[in-house]
Amino acid sequence: MPARGFALLLMAMTLAACGGLGGEPEILATMPPTESVQRATLAEPDWKPDIENGAGIFAERCVECHGVAGDGRGELALAGSIEPPLDMTERAQVAQKSPLAWFEIISKGNIANLMPPWENALSEEERWDLALYSYTLAYDEELLALGGRIWREQCGDCALPPLIPPVFSDVEYGAKLNRERFGDALTDAEAGAAVAYARMASLAPRDGPNALPAIDDVGQIRGALVQGTAGSVLPADILVQLRYGNADLGFRVAEAITDGDGEFRFDDIPISPDYDYAVGAMYKGRLFSQRISAADLSAANHETTITVFDETNDPLAISVARINMSIEPVTLEDRGAGLYISQMLTYRNETDRVYTSGRGFDDGREAALLVQFPGGARFLSGDAGGRYIVIEGMEGLPDSVIDTLPVLPGEVHQVFLAYWLPLADGAQFEQSFNNLIDAEVIVTLPDEFRIESDWLRQSADAGVGAGYKQYLAELTMDIDAQLRFGISSDPFATSSDDDWVVTSESLPALLFGALALVGTLLGAVAILTRRKSGEIDALASELARLEEDHDHGRINHDLYHHRRRELKAKLARLMEASDE
């Protein structure tokens, strides 16, 4: 399950409540025909979607169009292959609709928007799992935290509804809760937060947040919040939460408040090697957390430290510490011949403050780093989870991506990107940076290409893999930081591990001998035949590497299919020629 969705589920479990909502709501919609839809609409006890299963289905079948975060920025949408679908993280739009409407569109599809029907590919239970998971993508941590406070502070003796019929939108059910439970004292926004919290709690594991089995081995977990920013004072009375359990059995959340020294303590915590443990605290609107390994908890009492930081918006606080690039030729149906470039940028924050730009978005994400693509490049993919926001270039400016993950002091911060760069007779790579560069640069590309640069030097190390070479450099740039180099074709390989491959060194002698003697010509034919065999082996190996990269998620899905078709076509032509 994506981390974001799982975090929301856990937040919904922080309020341990039981019982039902007095007076189930009357049904306001025509009864759907199927038995499972009837049960869902009536909210009978045996109907309860599994949103963890829904998350898996969404990741497998939906992200290419809808994006990993459900924000409509999937690979096909970004490539212009389809119209951008609904942003399922847009709270104002989603709250007007009902999960039942979600279920029906999943089942029947939307041909006008090229969405296929899933009623024959997924069971009804799976479609409900998917519907409720995708519906709750509009719930963020801030919304659920507000909903939890409202239930605790304004309706402390109320029990959360065990099930919310999916025929009701959040707007409709929120109005009912406000009227029946809160005396119409809530604003529309507060009512929406209350129903979001209640709906997420109703979708917690079937046995509820107290489903973990009893464990005899209990201990104390204690620790302290430490101020990591010099000159800043840590306030008292900060809420600290401990989450423990596992995905199979569910999780519990315990809470504690720091004292004047920043210390906190959790007593009688079950200690199990099968559990995951994490402690977190909010400081100045930002979550700081620390994982605890089960091995560390083998001691009777465990102490942990959470370091919190103030923030800085100074871009000089950040530098690019490492640049890794891999370049492959590719032909895309909608773009033509070009280079597929995967890039890993490692940033370093040597200050004692969290770095972010100080600017945020309406959905709660914040702009941390701006990374520009080289001129002419087109974005293909980046990390999952809705972390990146792609900005199309305007007025001659290149496309760029905003990384919304703040850069913490002393931690490795990496940005993974993939993009396409057009290729004619060659390509000019020019990428500008808004941060300082004090980095090791590594560029890997096939032997048929070469780098033209005054500062990048080809490595003598042959350990990068057959058919590839590597260029290295140490680059320091404090002003106008930019990567710039040329990429050109190198039609003759200068070396080969295969004695039967014709290289730039052996080709002149081979041609001379072929012109001089018929016997030599026949020998050359034999050599070329073996060369063809070597090319077939090389293509087969490249196909195998491609499959492995795809299986491990190291290559864009569309690019994988394009590249696979291209390689198989080349392989078929070579094999046909070898049979002649």
Image (cartoon, rainbow, N blue to C red):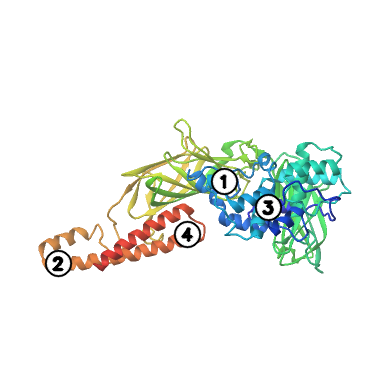
Give the image location of residue 370, x and y in percent: 54, 39
Q: Amino acid at mark 4?
A: Asp
Camera-side residue of 336 and 93: 93
Q: Which residue is mark 3?
A: 132
Q: Earlier in the sequence, mark 4 or mark 2?
A: 2
Q: Which label lies toward us, 3 or 1?
A: 3
Q: Earlier in the sequence, mark 1 or mark 2?
A: 1
Residue 273 image point, x, y percent: 72, 67
Q: Is residue 345 visible?
A: no
Q: Residue at (48%, 59%) from the top-left corner? A: 550
> Residue at (65%, 59%) from the top-left corner?
124
Circle 3 sits in a helix, a strand or a loop, which is it? Answer: helix
Task: Look at discs 2 and 3 and give the one toward the viewer.
Answer: 3
Residue identifier under label 1: 348
Q: Which residue is mark 2?
A: 520
Return the residue nearer the eye: 263 or 273: 273
- Real-space Cα distance between discs 3 and 1? 39 Å
Tag 1: residue type?
Arg
Q: Secondary structure at mark 4?
A: helix
Disc ID at residue 549: 4
- Which residue corresponds to the image point at 24% horizontal and 57% vertical from the top-left? 504
Say whether disc 2 or disc 3 marks the residue closer to the N-terminus: 3
Packing grade of label 4 (10 A; few <14, some 14-19, many >=20) is some
Q: Give the number of the mark in front: 4 or 3.
A: 3
Ranked by sequence position, the earlier of labels 1 and 4 is: 1
